[in-house]
Image: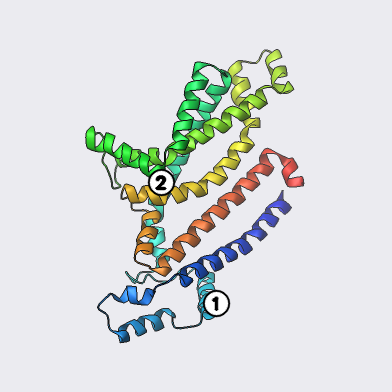
Amino acid sequence: MLDYAIYRIAVLLPTLLAVSLAVFLVLHLVPGDPARNAAGPDAEEEDIALIREHYGLDQPLWKQYGTYLVRLSQGDLGESFRSRRPVLDEIMRRLPATMELAGFAMLLAVLVGVGMGVAASMKPNSWVDDAIGALSAFGISVPVFFLGLLLMLLFAARLQWLPPSGRGSWANLVLPVVTLGLPYVATFARVTRSTMLEVLSEDYIRTARAKGLVRRTVIWRHALINAAIPLVTLLGVYFGRLLGGAVIVETIFAWPGLGRYMVDGIIQRDLQVVQGCILFFATAIVVVNLVVDLLYSVLDPRIARG
């Protein structure tokens, strides 16, 4: 187990290095002058040259990347062209809002999705199974931006039950969490149903039933635990997609998180902000996938031994 963990951690650094290089090259090769954008349309050429010199944009690309890596090793993600504030400070200030949104969306997906999948597997080919399948198909097929606007129109504009945007009380959280989490509710429901049906046909489940164990105990303590590995896989894969979806959802609902901060940086062509946000998202995804891999070895020790 320890050797497996060390190996997975050793792979983490080259992955992040490759991500940093890819992000750096893509953003610096995009047409446009970030120094001119930062200075404004009416700025003099001397002012623009000073900005280039201040941020090192007049240096060769390889030298800029070397300086960028040195700063990264010191925990410095640079300074915003627009606000002149450290990007890392802004990320830390906005991170709780994004984690709140993504955390509750994932919790909704796991609790509701797994519950629906277990219910469908207990009564396959029944009206319950058909209804859950229809709801799952709807959740997967509807685009996030359309669902967000639809929920906002219905519950905020028409019924006026919930606020349309902003962050503050639990009411502000409902619409963005449902918008972000509903597609993953559907996915967890479908995967749980198919995995549970496979597990419920195993010999040890029939043995547990033959011993006279209560059906609820068989389902929740034996079958669901052994069906957990695909669900853990989904947790790792969809955490990254949740962060990506949060960019859209935060923009729709004016949620003051990292996604909206990155969108503003893209619009203003603030390279330091975009680089910092993408690298932070990539680091979070890689770390979560590492945790998922380690959970694999806990749920099934054969993976670590392999």
Q: In the image, is residue 122 above or below residue 58? A: above
Element at label 2? helix
Give x and y (percent) for residue 56: 44, 80
Which of the numbered marks, if any, corresponds to residue 66? 1
Coordinates of residue 183 in the picture (x, y in percent): 46, 38
Lower position in the chain sequence, tag 2 or tag 1: 1
Q: Is residue 114 left or right of residue 90?
A: right
**Residue 285 appears in the figure:** yes
Q: Is residue 261 left or right of residue 201?
A: left
Residue type, numbered disc 2: Glu
Identified at 66% across, 26% down, the residue is: 198
- Sort mark 2 into few (<14), some (14-19) or many (20+) by Cα contacts within 10 Å: some
Image quadrant assignment for residue 234: top right
What crowding class fits label 1: few (fewer than 14 Cα within 10 Å), some (14-19), or many (20 or more)?
A: few
Q: Is residue 170 visible?
A: no
Mark 1: which secondary structure?
A: helix
- Here the colouring is rainbow
- Count of numbered badges drawn on the protein: 2
Distance of label 2 from label 1 (alpha carbons): 35 Å
**Residue hosting label 2:** 100
